[in-house]
């Protein structure tokens, strides 16, 4: 059976990055990859300005809402509220290592409480018919963070991850996204926790082998199509975060996974950006909120520094983009004359 692209590649949830504007930017290059919201706490949904937090544009489908929750009651309420926005999937964050998130007993902290996670997922599934997935780590080091009543605070063995899956799958989870390194809850900040603990891809492959009926997606440190090809030999799908944000043109290369040739030039993308920025300008939204996410458009090619500088000025707007587009056109013409 031919797989859908959304079952093969996704853009990782990233706070302050994968907001509506960035997701719209991704769609200017690739219409099919699976998108995630930033992590949104259940409390923010229960108490917040819903349209601001949850609304998205039709083009953003397929899109997953990523939720952070600490107990089943709030998880149920939040998913129920989010129902009207029609996300394609709801994901529970069991991977965030930040002390603020652990301090509120959410994110990677929950890997030490698989029964609790199973209860949260069961309630989420009562609130929606949409699939509920989990994004987690290989394990955690919960020293100085987990309750002192715990017999141990290190859950970093493959068997610990397997135990987590064994218990949570009973709640009906069919898809797991595994960030292939452990999270160290005390002593490392989130950035360090994305770099210092070593990547352990083999254990994710082993998990798929042991549980072939589950959809297992791998995440962490993936940067090239060659790496994606390698992972797809063993796994169902891959998730990329930082590479897509910094080098969005990589999205063009993903067509091959679902028999599509994506051929879009940077000029064509800028034309789409102009329309988008004109539209948000009309709504009174600062263009910078969108433009800041497009800094990688010229990643590692000539003009990258210039582009970043021009779109990063607070005054940059649709007119800036029109000027840059003309400059690119002139430059190309001159190059042809040489
Ligand atoms: C700025 C930033 C914010 C992130 N926010 C989230 C988040 O909200 N939820 C989540 O599950 N992971 C979050 N992550 C982790 C990513 O989803 C991903 O697991 C991690 O970056 C490793 O993938 P990569 O090497 O492809 O970037 C964030 C990462 C970054 C760089």
Image (cartoon, grey):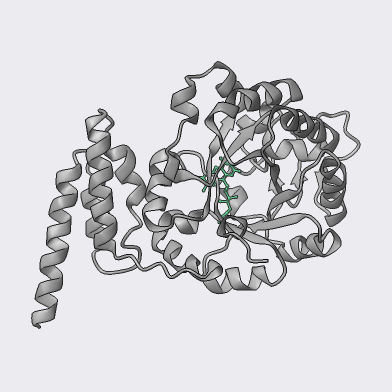
Compare residues 166 and 110 and report the one nearer the observer.
166
Residue 6: where, in percent of width, then height?
A: 57, 55
In the rendered image, which quarter is residue 103 located in? top right
> Is 271 above or below relative to 149?
below
- Mark yes or no: residue 304 visible: no
In the rendered image, which quarter is residue 190 located in? top right
Q: Residue at x 22, y 58 (%)?
A: 306
> Is 169 above or below relative to 308?
above
In the rendered image, which quarter is residue 132 located in? top right
Left-right relation of 36 to 109: left
Of all residues shown, which one is farthest toward the bottom? 338
Residue 195: where, in percent of width, then height?
A: 59, 55
Residue 131: where, in percent of width, then height?
A: 69, 41
Q: Residue at x 50, y 45 (%)?
A: 61
Compare residues 108 and 53 and report the one nearer the observer.
53
Q: Quadrant of the C terminus?
A: bottom left
Compare residues 106 and 140 and report the one nearer the observer.
106
Left-right relation of 272 to 241: left
Q: Residue at x 41, y 67 (%)?
A: 262
Of all residues shown, which one is farthest toward the top? 47
Residue 41: where, in percent of width, then height?
A: 60, 28
Number of callouts: 0
- Mark yes or no: residue 226 visible: yes
Of all residues shown, which one is farthest toward the front? 1
Q: Quadrant of the N terminus?
A: bottom right
> Is 160 above or below relative to 82?
below
Q: Residue at x 23, y 47 (%)?
A: 274
């Amino acid at each position: 059976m031919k797989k859908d692209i959304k079952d093969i590649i996704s853009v990782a949830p990233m706070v302050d990055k994968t907001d509506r504007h960035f997701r719209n930017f991704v769609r200017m290059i690739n219409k099919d990859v699976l998108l995630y919201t930033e992590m949104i706490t259940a409390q923010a949904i229960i108490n917040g300005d819903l349209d601001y937090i949850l609304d998205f544009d039709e083009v953003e489908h397929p899109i997953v809402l990523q939720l952070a929750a600490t107990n089943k009651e709030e998880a149920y309420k939040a998913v129920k509220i989010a129902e009207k926005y029609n996300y394609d999937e709801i994901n529970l964050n069991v991977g965030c290592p930040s002390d603020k998130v652990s301090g509120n007993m959410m994110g990677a902290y929950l890997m030490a409480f698989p029964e609790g996670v199973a209860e949260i997922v069961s309630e989420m599934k009562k609130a929606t018919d949409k699939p509920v997935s989990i994004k987690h780590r290989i394990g955690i080091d919960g020293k100085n963070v987990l309750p002192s009543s715990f017999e141990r605070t290190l859950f970093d063995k493959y068997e610990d991850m397997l135990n987590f899956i064994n218990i949570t799958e009973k709640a009906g989870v069919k898809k797991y996204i595994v960030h292939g390194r452990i999270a160290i809850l005390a002593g490392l900040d989130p950035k360090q926790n994305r770099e210092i603990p070593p990547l352990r891809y083999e254990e994710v492959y082993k998990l798929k082998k042991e549980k072939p009926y589950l959809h297992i997606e791998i995440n962490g440190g993936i940067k090239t199509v060659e790496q994606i090809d390698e992972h797809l030999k063993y796994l169902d799908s891959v998730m990329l975060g930082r590479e897509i944000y910094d080098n969005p043109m990589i999205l063009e290369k993903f067509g091959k996974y679902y028999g599509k040739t994506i051929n879009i030039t940077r000029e064509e993308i800028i034309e789409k950006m102009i329309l988008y920025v004109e539209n948000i300008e009309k709504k009174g939204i600062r263009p910078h909120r969108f433009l800041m996410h497009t800094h990688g458009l010229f990643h590692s090619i000539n003009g990258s520094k210039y582009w970043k500088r021009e779109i990063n000025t607070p005054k940059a707007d649709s007119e800036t983009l029109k000027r840059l587009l003309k400059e690119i056109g002139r430059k190309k013409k001159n190059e042809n004359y040489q």
